[in-house]
Image (spheres, rainbow, N blue to C red):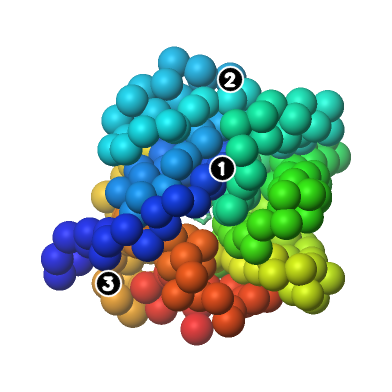
Amino acid sequence: MSENLKPTGQRLTGKRIAVTGSSRGIGAGIALWLAKEGATVVITYSSNEASALAVAKSLPGQGHICLPLNVSDEASVDAFFAKVLEGGPLAGFVNNAGITRDQLILRMKTEDFDAVINTNLRGTFLCARGAVKAMFKSKTAGSIVNITSVIGEMGNAGQSNYAASKAGVEGLTKSLAKEVASRGIRLNCVAPGFIVTEMTAALNDEQKLKIQSGIPLGTLGETEDIAAAVAFLLSNEARYITGHTLSVNGGLYI
Ligand SMILES: NC(=O)c1ccc[n+]([C@@H]2O[C@H](COP(=O)([O-])OP(=O)(O)OC[C@H]3O[C@@H](n4cnc5c(N)ncnc54)[C@H](O)[C@@H]3O)[C@@H](O)[C@H]2O)c1
């Protein structure tokens, strides 16, 4: 990439924002970026509390907290919202938690299909419902950002479960955007392409070159590219944008 990205300022000062699955990867990158933009961040983790605490410790500013949240478990989602609201209203929510269970269809086990839909689509539904409810209650004009994927837009052999879950989130987002716009709540998606994370670090050079050759901007994206797009959609600069999917994929799918 040409130059390092930096947050533009304090666009999110005074906003309390929760990010699911933020103990590592893209979620941790989003949490850091939001804090640099002045937000108070609620880090959530499904199992790795130590890693979540380390992320919280690394954030600039004050008042950041870590809470457990398993997005595919309704009781856990309910408990999370009850707890998080004790600390004040939420102005933003980022549905970032997601999993893959890749396999060609003839070898794909039903439980692998269900697991991906449960976490990525049902989990986003449960958390979006909780966030909308909380924003209604506190009369907060909030912003919800759902992380989808370029795979949900273009499809990919071996990822039918994942593509279906992410395309589903896009439909969910558009419908909810229409439902709650009158209450001042906006919902949008950010659809990443291939991003450098632990997952892509496992690819060998040949695989990386093959992926890069299909990306018009010539390189994989970085966590900061996703975080910057999320911060924009959470900020007041995006106050007239709802029901939109912002593709951050280097031109991989246009
Ligand atoms: N890395 C990429 O290239 C890429 C591309 C497109 C989309 N995405 C999407 O970005 C998001 C983050 O991906 P990542 O690359 O950082 O992956 P990752 O595996 O590093 O992080 C996913 C996070 O979700 C959490 N999680 C998983 N199941 C959960 C559950 N049931 N409840 C709560 N948390 C749960 C994990 O603990 C982890 O913190 C995902 O939604 C993924 O689909 C990633």
> Residue type at mark 3?
Gly
Taking the spot 51% from the left edge, 62% from the top edge, the residue there is 234
Note whether ligand 1 is within 8 Å of mark 2: yes
Q: What element carries label 2?
A: loop
Taking the spot 15% from the left edge, 69% from the top edge, the residue there is 2
Position of 235 relative to 58 (above/below):
below
Q: What element carries label 1?
A: strand
Q: Nearer the viewer, mark 2 or mark 3?
A: 2
Taking the spot 50% from the left edge, 75% from the top edge, the residue there is 238
> Residue type at mark 2?
Ser
Residue 220 in sight here? yes
Position of 56 relative to 60 (above/below):
above
Spatial distance from mark 1 to mark 3, Cα to Cα?
33 Å
Crowding at mark 1 (Cα within 10 Å: few <14, some 14-19, many 20+):
many
Q: Which of marks 1 and 3 is in front?
A: 1
Taking the spot 61% from the left edge, 61% from the top edge, the residue there is 143
Residue 239 position, x and y percent, is 55, 76
Do residues under tags 1 and 3 come within 8 Å of each other at their CB atoms?
no
Note whether ligand 1 is within 8 Å of mark 3: no
Tag 2 or tag 1, which sits nearer the N-term?
1
> Residue type at mark 1?
Ala
Position of 3 relative to 84 (above/below):
below
Q: What element carries label 3?
A: loop
How many marks can you see? 3
Q: Which residue lies under the disc numbered 2?
A: 47
Q: Which residue lies under the disc numbered 3?
A: 218
Crowding at mark 2 (Cα within 10 Å: few <14, some 14-19, many 20+):
few
Which quadrant of the rendered structure holds the N terminus?
bottom left
